[in-house]
Image (spheres, rainbow, N blue to C red):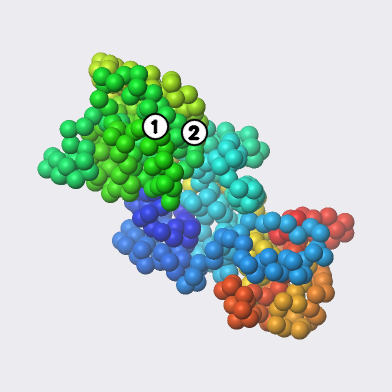
Amino acid sequence: MKVAIDVVPIRNTGEMGGAFQLVIELIKGLAQHNSNDQYYLLTAEWNHQYFEAFEQYGIERILVQASSKPQQPVKTTFFYKVKRKIFNKIKKFSKKIFKSVNLTRTSILRSRSIDVLFCPMSAVNYSEPGIPTLSLIYDLQHKYYPQFFTEEEIAVRDNYYKGISELADYVVCISDFTKNTLVEKLNYPQDRAEVIYISIQDRLNGISSIDTAEINQKLGLKGKNYAYYPANFWSHKNHRVLLTAMSIFINKYPELDLHLCLTGSLLNQEAYFNEIISQMNLQDRVLHLGYVTEHEVSVIMENASFLIFPSLFEGFGIPVAEALSMGTPVICSQNTSLPEVGGDAVLYFDPRKPEEIAEVMKNIVTDKPLRDRLVLKGYEQIKKFDNSIMIKQYHELLSKVASVESFNKYSISGIYGDNWSGEAVDISISDESIDRYLYVELILPSVSPHKRGQLHLTINGKIKKYTFTTDSLLVITEDLPKVTGEISIVIRTTFKPSEIGIPDERKLGVQIPKVDIREKHSGKSLKSLHGA
């Protein structure tokens, strides 16, 4: 089996948290699981060198995104200028997903006889017709807590997952909760969605007693009884309610000497956090350490009286599983995926009720037999998250997906989310029994320095040239063969907005509001490749 793994979205390597660690473990484990398989990593210039070390496992790297400056998934000033100046004429011009696009001109997968494309960072950017695709889904938080996102962020996420639903033959989810969300909220076929739990690696184990003493002294934790919560200061992590619960606990049970240790980024909200601490008079009982190393996390977790995890939303909940593996008692939210991770080895609470949280804190602090029982149950629960089991399940699923016929008969690359093309648009088509044709709408906006546009359309080696004027709609309709083939639209009149004083570094060609594959006789759309 030949498997291509898309790691292009990994741009910060070791700083991407749980998803990054999962992908690294998967790549290593899969490459060593079956010597008859061949794995290829689709890389970008910003991570190609990092993944060089994986060649020791017999993995081949393929550089598919060779831009020194990755395209940023944001609306540019240029987009707004063009929208105001040109596209008030186009009524259906709407918000799109703004993402990096594949500008590669060659058939990366088919040329290597790839059996399956695996997208462990969710986005499906390099699919090709006839090659089955598996996407890994982490969570759909915006469907449950839209108040934590802007309207633009929600639109981007909706389009993002819509694209995955249309292109992925199968998806794998990190929890039953995530799978059920995908089926319920996106109407994704249940029989094409699988669940494989995240394994718990040994990254937090193996710290010596000398290191432990030094780290405790350094962090100011020596001699303290404390609850531990590792989380960035995102809204869904629910810090405000946790601090309220801590205040209630201190006032109600002053005889219990308990501190709260927090790690993670405050996301530039230090002033707001300190104001809360001051208002609740928690200066002497709450210690925020900010970013800490894995060694330090290990010491903090292992020496904590218990882990407290009041999150409102999780796709999985890695810290809960890690605490169980280290013999640290856990109390946590009853929401989303967390009961799957904790099983009967943790105590649960309603994360919206600080009084209830305070009572559960008291129970775990004062009842040693309860803590001991939970620790023993935790060692049993953690067996569900064994790394060898995870690798075996992924290999079996990849083999299953590789054996199915992909429903994706078409793919397109080279068009950005704001409808601008690069210097080339590439379309791949697979066999089709009915007569069909290509339908494309193009516009050269007057913001372009070119007065006339020129392009070459190539269908299976046959070239046709087009010339068109600015601000006029060019509609291309060309019959397509029934066999597998390649289509390219090469824009001869490109420009960089930055060269005419607009802060956009992309090399742009024309606006392409719509690309369709249509049935020849009825004109009915067989596949909308771009545009509404």
Rendered location of residue 107, percent (x, y): 57, 67
Callouts 1 and 2 close, C-beta under 8 Å:
no
Residue type (three-letter) at the residue carrying disc 1: Met
Residue 26 in view: no
229 sits to left or right of 77: left
Rendered location of residue 421, percent (x, y): 66, 70
364 sits to left or right of 314: left
Q: Is residue 362 above or below residue 417?
A: above
**Cα–Cα gap, marks 1 and 2:** 22 Å
Density class for disc 1 (Cα within 10 Å; few <14, some 14-19, many ≥20) is: some
Residue tagged by mark 1?
Answer: 280
Question: Under tag 2, what secondary structure?
Answer: loop
Residue 530 in view: yes
Q: Which is nearer the N-term, disc 1 or disc 2? A: 1
Q: Residue at x 67, y 57 (%)?
A: 96
Rendered location of residue 243, percent (x, y): 40, 32
Question: Under tag 1, what secondary structure?
Answer: loop
Q: Residue at x 69, y 69 (%)?
A: 81
Q: Looking at this view, is 430 or 242 the one in front?
A: 242
98 sits to left or right of 172: right
Q: Looking at this view, is 128 or 528 the one in front?
A: 528
Residue tagged by mark 2?
Answer: 312
